[in-house]
Amino acid sequence: MRSSHLTRLLLSTAALALMTAGPALAQSAEGARLNEYVRVLASDEFEGRGVATPGEQKTVDYLVSQFQALGLEPGGPDGQWVQVAQLGRTRPDGPATITVSSGGTIRTLERGPQVLVSSDRPVSHITLSDAPIVFAGYGVDAPERGWDDFKGVDLHGKILLVLVNDPDFQAPAGHPVAGRFDDNAMTFYGRWTYKFQEAARQGAAAVLVIHDTAGAGYGWSVLENSSTAPKFDIVRDDPEAERVAAQGWIQGDVAADLFTAAGLDFAALKAQARTPEFRPVTLDGVTMSIDFGQTADRIESRNVLARIPGAGHPDETVMYGAHWDAFGIATPKDGDAIYNGAVDNATGAAALLELARLFKAGTPPDRSVVFASWTAEEAGLLGSEYYAANPVWPLETTVVNINMDSFLPGTEVSPTIVVIGAGKSDADAWLERRATEQGRTLIPDPAPQAGGFYRSDHFPLARKGVPALFAAAGFTGHNAASQDYVAHRYHQPSDDWTPDWVMDAAAVDVDLLYAVGRDLADSRAWPQWTPGAEFEAARQASADQRPE
């Protein structure tokens, strides 16, 4: 879809009237500053910025010191720089034994190469013995789309196998399911996080997502490399009701063998799972046992929040957000166990600091601007989820949430800007106007099957109704540099800063995001979700709390 056509679809007459031409900006982002921030945050000294590690303390201290030096004020509760997020943490403790029994034989599955299991329950040991296995299609219950994979079947004590992504992913043209779940653009129903949560709601004992690279958006190695890192969740009142005992992934060919052992045709069942008539199928004669230990405790992690109060409407907030965490110290690869997270997401944290400098150097904005550096994004967007459940600044009067997750180093400015979730809100139009001034155009996500909109920190706030803008800018996913990064460094120790880095192109991207946020901070506009967007109702519920 051409970006100009996308904008015409999004903008109402009222929105156009409020979208005043922003002024030329007197200050610009500096690549050298961005580069220095990344160098520090991605250094081995910060130990991969793992949540609840010494690396977290170093990261939080550094971010706070930089915001202080820039002259911002604390943006957290009670005048603090941080918002403490209460999290549960589990870590593998010893080996896992995973066996499959069928036809009088027992087969052992290897944790890591074949299957990955963990638990978010705050217990030290998980044991499931000879549990029946049930294929539950895509594991989706979406009444608004006329879809229910469960059909009221009693799944208590069962281990579910579910397909990754949505029922219409890669559906052939003309298939009845095509377009039911936004075609190849993954919805929240396609995400593994949803499938884990829904399995718990259905009463299952465990759930394993059947992996395939196209459907997941990443290879098995990405999952395996991070599998030894601690798992986090927000503290829950009733974890046994909200989380299954065991959850994880299973290799596609390994899952296919289980179907064969039960005398079932995996390919035929996958085809059936594309239909709304699908019902859960038990793998008769095949059971699975899972046994592993873990440590479980509660920890506190921290969102760092800084603020510039608005001169005219301080109770209204434009928010910028980027997560500070990476994977800490985890599975060694090529002798390196520190997952430095240089691109993902020291660059986003660096951009947050540079944006704060730009806003502070200009005249005070009319609306307040909050800079949120989130914790525990890699653990499941938990820092932003905690904020969404415990907002410091009212979500009802948060104008927009501008998310930043990964900028690539280099000097070549991309002529195109990928909008993750293009068309979901008219915030896109504010981006397009400033992008046009840079001679650049907007394009939709070239890999919508990966569900990028549901995998970054704007999403928990979007579910509460806050309009989101996630412009990937130079990190387009379809050019050679970003493809090389995803293939060789994403979520690996090799995502590291090196002395040949320059951040000149990223500085242009930061200028763009600054201009968009500045325009909205100085306007009286309230970006709106596109009619029919899944978050529209949540925003409309608070419409009376926003001034005209």
Image (cartoon, grey):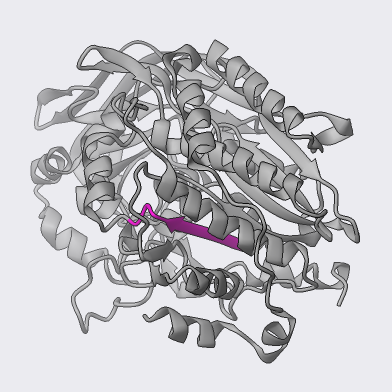
Q: Quadrant of the N terminus?
A: bottom left
Main SS category, magenta section: strand
Q: Residue furthest front?
A: 26
Spot occupied by residue 330 in the image (x, y as percentages of width and height): 36, 17
Residue placed most toward the observer, 246 or 90: 90
Q: Is residue 242 visible?
A: no
Spot occupied by residue 239 in the image (x, y as percentages of width and height): 59, 32
Q: Quadrant of the C terminus?
A: bottom right
At 64% from the left edge and 72% from the top edge, which residue is drawn?
536
Residue placed most toward the observer, 129 or 27: 27
Spot occupied by residue 206 in the image (x, y as percentages of width and height): 39, 36
Image vertical order of residue 467 relative to residue 502, above or below = below
Q: Is residue 289 left or right of residue 127?
A: left
At 12% from the left edge and 58% from the top edge, which residue is drawn?
267
Q: Residue furthest top?
A: 94
Callout count = 0
Residue placed most toward the observer, 481 or 459: 481
Q: Residue furthest bottom?
A: 13
Image vertical order of residue 4 relative to residue 51, above or below = below
Q: Is residue 129 visible?
A: yes
Query: Does the magenta-highlighted stretch encompass residue 474?
Result: yes
At 33% from the left edge and 72% from the top edge, which residue is drawn?
183
Residue placed most toward the observer, 433 or 456: 433
Image vertical order of residue 115 relative to residue 523, above or below = above
Image vertical order of residue 302 relative to residue 397, above or below = above
Magenta residues (range): 468-476
Spot occupied by residue 35 in the image (x, y as percentages of width and height): 47, 34
Query: Does the magenta-highlighted stretch encompass residue 160?
Result: no
